[in-house]
Image: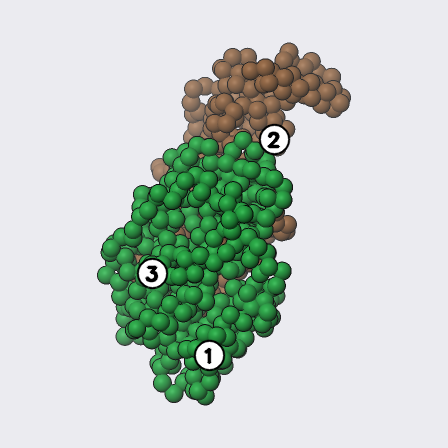
Amino acid sequence: MSARSDSQARSIGKGISRIASAGLTCPVPAGAVDCVLLGHGSGGKLSAALLAERFLPRFGNDVLAQLGDAAIVEVPGDRMAVSTDSFVVSPLEFPGGNIGHLAVHGTVNDLAMMGAEPLYLSAGFILEEGLPFDVLDRVLDSMAEAASEAGVIVITGDTKVVERGKADGMFINTTGIGSLDSTFRPGPDRARAGDAVIVSGPIGAHGVAIMAARDDLGFEVEVRSDTACLAPLVRSLREVCGESVHVLRDPTRGGVASALNEIAASSGVGVRLDEGSLPFPDPVRAVCEILGLDPLYVANEGILVAIVEEDAADDAVTALRSHAEGSSAVRVGTITEDRPGFVVLTTGLGVSRIVDMLPGDQLPRIC
Amino acid sequence: MKYVSEYRDPELARSLIDRILATASRPRVLMEVCGGQTHTIVRQGLQELLRGAVDMIHGPGCPVCVTPLEQIDRALHLAARPDVIFTSFGDMLRVPGSDGDLLQVRARGGEVRVVYSPLDALEIARAQPDREVVFFAVGFETTAPANAMAVWRARELGVSNFSVLVSHVTVPPAIRAILDAPDNRVEAFLAAGHVCTVMGWKEYEPLVEEYGVPIVVTGFESVDILEGIYMAIRQLEEGRAEVENQYVRSVRRAGNEPAQELVSKVFVPVDRKWRGIGEIPQSGLGLREEFAAFDAEKRFQLESIRTSEPEACMAGDVLRGRIKPFECPAFGDECTPERPLGAPMVSSEGACAAYYNYARFQQQPSAETA
């Protein structure tokens, strides 16, 4: 215990000097520290201060300000979309973003993939004792910024603090609510033979950025996570292609290969990919070559896979390219009647091979 | 991507395929020794394109696949010990032992870490002097120099909490065992380019002479492999049997001599069991007596752990080239990458997994081609 007290004392000292050096004149509460303490989850004064100083100023809105046991909101239309996702990424911050961006984009994008217009978010935080406040602040800033860009508000939330060693810095869960347009209903089971398969941008950037950010690899590659809100891309697709958009998916964990396998299984169709058309950025290729990984299975956080009617394919690509996030949108394949349930890739030599689901995580090869 | 895309150029590949098809007077049986080559052949569908001219048999060159069950069981035993940090290359983690795999040991609380180099494992040992750090030293001659270096450095630095569980194997004795088998069909070999980067090709010259079998040192990209096949076919058609080098950008006859020297200072040839094949005399590397302090088998008294292979698995016949993976009754039913019976279904370089992942359609008529 004494060791911890010492380090706490040091933290407190550092915290005070940091605040002092920032030239703040407001009264510093007694026991000011620069990291999360177990007491911040106690429900007492520290909890209230955490909420009042760090969360509410960033997410402030009329609904959240009520601070009731539940948020009361209106949702247009008679049906709504709800999606939940938990975020446990390590490291918390990486080139191109942090866990806060992911926590907003991940859930907002899931709503958008079902054709919903994202409106509201809940946010649950599990904080590890000792998490530096400057990290928490940066994550919360990113969440607030991402939510504002996506046009959603955080209407309810929760924070818990767990002992050191019981969480990896912080975990975030978000649940999103979106309104549905009755005529725009993309779904994973709606792919039809003859449809075009389109991806909205370069494949594999997020997963490779995370791998490179983990210090055990010692890579220096200029790959930034592609984390982005995809709702504007979906809006354009809805406006330009409407009901011709059959399936939308954001190929996160498991990558493009897993997303397409799930679509093939749900829709009872085959997917044929053309190897030469797949947009893998060179640094992604290079890292994957070194580690023996396949970029088709690497996670993405800012691209979508769209399956649209053949006649609408060119318009869909053009619509996607009107956005910065979709500027390299490209058609990569076709839905087939042949080999239902399978994703088949045509290699540069004109031979077909299966692109299967992975049994687990990709494991780096020996040689 | 430079230095890779040139060797995957479809135009070049097609012209080599045409030359192979035009040169082979009858279907020739070739074996690629290395799992990395198997991966490319199956992934790129080269087999399909060479049908009628070449029958590729996938050799025992995946280190993950040939590491004997017994050694996996020893690894599982070590990794479960609370005083041990067990370090390994990534793809060993899913290799099934008699009771689970390293991923399951980790889930139950064992400390298992993926490293990319044995020297990283040594660093962990230096950083955590109160824990025993064991590195799973598997692989062919390719990984032997780095593993030798880790042991050498450990002794130099006086690191007393570092040891290696050695399961090294070497290529030439395996080629000899295949050629000595009474039902051998292999007419020529593609030798593994990276093994030869370290070892050179001098040790293949006696094999060529003794057995009259062409051996072509070959790289790993599609154009490399097709060129290697073409060179082997030409030798067969012209009645020659020589060691030739396709992988000139990496391999020279003498190999990497400083690496060889280090390997022979730390390791000594030993008899070694190969998963699915059994014991091949002098086919492995073990630590020299003076490095016994770094031998995990001795340090943790693992010799008593002895196990035998499951009977349903025909990995031995696959690795010897007697059957194609899909001819095994367990393939795709009892044995899949999710629930592998034998090691060739585990690593993406394993012949069974390569077929399962990329080429299941080769056994099923497709609606397009039927």
Residue type at the position of mark 1: Glu
**How many marks overall?**
3
- Across and down, in percent, residue A182 comes to 37, 45
Instruction: State whether residue A203 is above or below residue B245.
Output: above
Image disc number at residue B209: 1
Chain drawn brown in the picture: A
* Disc ID at residue A295: none
- At x 35%, y 43%, the residue is B304
Residue located 55% across and 57% down the image:
B264
Please identify the residue farthest to the front as the structure is shown. Answer: B289
For marks 3 and 2, give the CA distance: 54 Å
- Chain painted green: B
* Rendering quarter of residue B214: bottom left
Could you tell me residue A221's position as x and y percent?
A: 62, 51
Image mark for residue B277: 3
Which is more foreground, mark 3 or mark 2? Answer: 3
